[in-house]
Image (tube, rainbow, N blue to C red):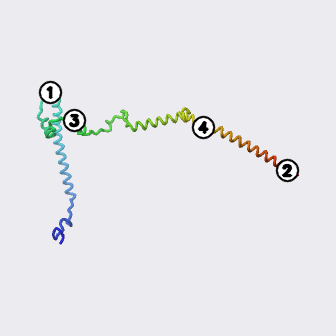
Amino acid sequence: MPKGGKKGGHKGRMRTYTSPEEIDAQMKAEKERKKQEQEEEGVEGAAQNDMAEEKLPGSGSEDSDDENSLRRRAGVEGLIEIENPNRVAQKSKKVTQIELDEPKQLSRREREEIEKQKAKERYMKMHLAGKTDQAKADLARLAIIRKQREEAAKKKEEEKKAKEAAAAAARGINSLSLK
């Protein structure tokens, strides 16, 4: 006999699905509840405006301030005022509020990367102008190589002329011997 008796527990039961009418009814009830909450917030918002006026010097009602502070703070929190920037809700900015005139703050890595690129460009300009030590060494090496190539070309021409003269002389001897 299997565990749990003859019948196999919860497995195999029929599933029940929510009908579309029930879903619509739940949605309407939820919307009504939200509307009621917004109306209540409107009343509380007016109370909060009164509280803001109370903070100004010369304001008279302190009852609503005490009620709101008791609702918001419980225990020791009511005794200590904390200015924790992490507890403040982040305010989202609209696109129209963002100032594009402010210079963009770059990170250290971005600044270093930009400086490196500018330094590289400056070096390449100096190098092309022949003002850097490496450019001077390259130009000197180029001049030496050009001279060597010119000398090698002259030697080849002289050897070529010498071979042609030797060949002409050999032909001259061959032609004389044949006659």
Amino acid type, residue under disc 1 in the picture: Gly
Q: Where is residue 113, by image quadrant? A: top left
Amino acid type, residue under disc 4 in the picture: Arg
Q: Earlier in the sequence, mark 2 or mark 4?
A: 4
Q: Nearer the viewer, mark 3 or mark 4?
A: 4
Residue identifier under label 2: 175
The residue at 86%/49% (across/down) is 176
Mark number, residue 141: 4
Label 3 sits on a secondary structure element that is loop
Is the C-beta separation of discs 1 and 4 under 8 Å?
A: no
Crowd rating for badge 4 (residues with CA inside 10 Å; few <14, some 14–19, many 20+) = few
How far apart in space, not on screen, are marks 3 and 4 (Cα)? 70 Å
Mark number, residue 83: 3
Crowd rating for badge 2 (residues with CA inside 10 Å; few <14, some 14–19, many 20+) = few
How far apart in space, not on screen, are marks 1 and 4 (Cα)? 89 Å
Image x and y of residue 174, in percent:
84, 50
Crowd rating for badge 1 (residues with CA inside 10 Å; few <14, some 14–19, many 20+) = few
The residue at 18%/51% (across/down) is 29
Mark number, residue 58: 1
How far apart in space, not on screen, are marks 2 and 1 (Cα)? 135 Å
The residue at 17%/31% (across/down) is 55
Q: Earlier in the sequence, mark 2 or mark 1?
A: 1
Q: Earlier in the sequence, mark 2 or mark 3?
A: 3
Amino acid type, residue under disc 3 in the picture: Glu
Q: Earlier in the sequence, mark 1 or mark 4?
A: 1
How far apart in space, not on screen, are marks 3 and 1 (Cα)? 25 Å
